[in-house]
Image (tube, grey):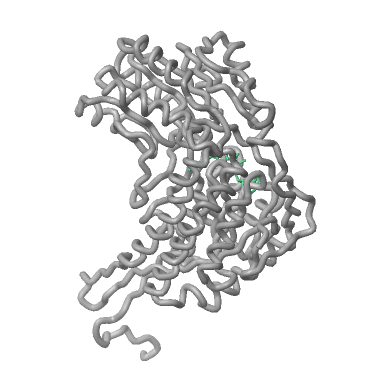
């Protein structure tokens, strides 16, 4: 089956008649597909299909064991198609194939297995303190979930949303980014190959302002889960809020990576490189502000720059590639404009800051490192979302926490120290939803992943997804025949 359909509705690929959206390979600039946009009509068909599939109970009416078995089957099918899915994801995003396979596609399968395990253990509550009554609190699926995923990790993040939504019995409609939809198209096809009932997972592809907006506002869509930029999140949350739809927002970041002089130095250098250059620098959780204690600054900067100079930049298909192209020409230009801004604001560019001259085609950048004393500089405030690190120096832990928290974002923080009391203090002081101490990017699916401040509202993770994708119902029973007050007997 070709994957350039516009929508996948009730188990069938559908071609729309909206304007064609070109899908470009960022490494070769070759056009991979031109997908006619799914317009309002297809969003409506997808929403109706999801509603029917929900109402007739073809999925949430199954036993937990049957749902677990299906989720595990989906994971197996994803794993079996790992080579194909990784190749599609790499062609469409420029993410090095080694990272696409080991991180993104492996994670996609893992998401389904995680939720299969989770639902087998989920439990309700009973309040039986009242002598005459017993009260139960249970959860039921909400209905139809609208899922909107970004282009930087389409399959991994899309799979998290689909798995979370359907594990608890909902139907869903996913909208990938129009820039990088192909991996999610393939994922939805694989989910059906595993045998999921038709209409439980549907897909619509197109621009955010058209297809995404229609999805968020559709009256049959009961809740919205969004991962993307803060500005878009604000618009989507407002639209959903108008209709009183619950929504979760996983948004941008400008995370601090704090390196104290008590750190294991080599690990901190490794962690700082991974934190900013993994995924071609396009990660919400990137450690893009590297805060270094002044006493080790010279040594750290020298070591960091040496390693940056040796990063293997190249085709994402080459096994050794560590840094591939960024996602689009527009995104490349946006990142470069931040290098210009940094120069204009008098910052020192220690490395990079230009398009990479070694490639005839592709949106390659030199990995960029800038140094400043001003935490208020533009590149310290705004999310750049590329291979662009900013180094800031600090003297005391108080300085470090103040600089780290001086941002409108609050997604994650990284801390490197071998001083246990300093580590404990850091996790207390840092204003972010996640704090990683002496480890980069450890995603524990049982725990919430969500941002503070403008990095998000709500979180994804076991309990948090259960809370979001289900609604509570309180049932109170009389424990024995009650002597009710008798009205109308006077
Ligand atoms: P965008 O906010 O531009 O887009 C995200 C998704 O929303 C895309 O599918 C987009 O469609 C869609 N969209 C855009 N406008 C609307 C609208 N009005 N209504 C409905 N849907 C809409 O983000 P990017 O794709 O550029 O992704 C990068 C951002 O995502 C970064 O800021 C990053 O930090 C954040 N992110 C956050 C994560 C987290 O967990 N907190 C994880 C990963 C990324 P289209 O692209 O087709 O226009």
Q: Can residue 13 be seen by looking at this rendering? A: yes
Up-down: is 278 above or below 194?
A: above
Up-down: is 471 above or below 485?
A: above
Screen quadrant of the C terminus? bottom left
User: At 38% from the left edge and 64% from the top edge, which residue is drawn?
Assistant: 116
Percent across and percent down for residue 139 are 39, 67
User: At 40% from the left edge and 35% from the top edge, which residue is drawn?
Assistant: 412
Percent across and percent down for residue 344 are 61, 11
Q: Can residue 168 be seen by looking at this rendering? A: no
Percent across and percent down for residue 100 are 50, 44
Q: Quadrant of residue 410?
A: top left
Looking at the image, in which quadrant does ligand 1 appear? top right
Q: Nearer the viewer, residue 363 or 442?
A: 363
User: At 47% from the left edge and 46% from the top edge, which residue is drawn?
Assistant: 101
User: At 59% from the left edge and 70% from the top edge, which residue is drawn?
Assistant: 199
Q: Quick check: 299 left or right of 357?
A: left
């Amino acid at each position: 089956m070709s994957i350039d359909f516009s929508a996948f509705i009730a188990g069938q690929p559908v071609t729309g008649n909206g304007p064609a959206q070109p899908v470009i390979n960022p490494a070769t600039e070759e056009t991979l597909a031109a997908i006619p946009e799914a317009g309002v009509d297809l969003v409506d068909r997808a929403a109706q299909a999801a509603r029917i599939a929900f109402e007739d109970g073809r999925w949430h009416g199954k036993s937990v064991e049957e749902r677990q078995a299906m989720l595990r089957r989906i994971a197996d099918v994803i794993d079996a198609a790992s080579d194909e899915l990784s190749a599609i994801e790499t062609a469409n995003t420029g993410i090095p194939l080694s990272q696409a396979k080991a991180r993104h596609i492996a994670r996609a399968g893992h998401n389904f297995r995680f939720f299969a395990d989770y639902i087998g253990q989920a439990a309700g509550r009973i309040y039986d303190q009242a002598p005459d009554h017993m009260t139960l609190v249970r959860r039921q699926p909400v209905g139809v979930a609208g899922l909107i995923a970004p282009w930087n990790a389409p399959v991994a993040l899309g799979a998290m949303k689909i798995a979370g939504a359907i594990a608890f019995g909902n139907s869903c409609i996913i909208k990938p980014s129009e820039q990088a939809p192909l991996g999610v198209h393939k994922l939805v096809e694989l989910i059906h190959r595993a045998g999921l009932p038709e209409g439980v997972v549907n897909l619509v592809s197109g621009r955010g302002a058209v297809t995404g907006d229609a999805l968020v506002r559709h009256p049959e869509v009961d809740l919205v889960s969004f991962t993307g930029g803060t500005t878009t999140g604000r618009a989507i949350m407002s639209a959903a809020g108008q209709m009183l739809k619950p929504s979760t927002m996983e948004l941008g970041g400008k995370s601090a990576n704090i390196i104290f002089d008590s750190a294991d130095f080599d690990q901190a250098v490794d962690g700082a490189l991974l934190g900013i250059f993994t995924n071609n620098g396009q990660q919400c959780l990137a450690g893009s502000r590297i805060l270094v204690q002044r006493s080790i600054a010279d040594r750290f900067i020298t070591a960091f720059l040496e390693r940056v100079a040796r990063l293997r930049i190249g085709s994402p298909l080459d096994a050794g590639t560590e840094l591939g192209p960024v996602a689009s020409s527009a995104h490349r230009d946006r990142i470069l404009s931040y290098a210009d801004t940094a120069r204009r604001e008098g910052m020192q560019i220690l490395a990079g800051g230009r398009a990479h001259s070694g490639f005839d085609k592709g949106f390659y950048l030199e990995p960029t490192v800038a140094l400043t004393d001003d935490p208020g500089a533009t590149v310290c405030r705004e999310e750049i979302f590329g291979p662009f690190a900013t180094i800031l120096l600090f003297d005391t832990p108080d300085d470090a926490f103040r600089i780290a928290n001086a941002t409108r974002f609050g997604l994650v923080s990284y801390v490197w120290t071998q001083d246990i009391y300093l580590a404990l203090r850091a996790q207390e002081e840092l204003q972010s939803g996640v704090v990683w101490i002496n480890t980069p990017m450890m995603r524990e699916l049982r725990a919430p992943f969500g941002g503070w401040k403008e990095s998000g509202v709500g979180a994804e993770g076991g309990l948090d997804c259960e809370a979001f994708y289900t609604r509570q119902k309180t049932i109170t029973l009389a424990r024995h025949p009650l002597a009710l007050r008798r009205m109308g007997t006077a």
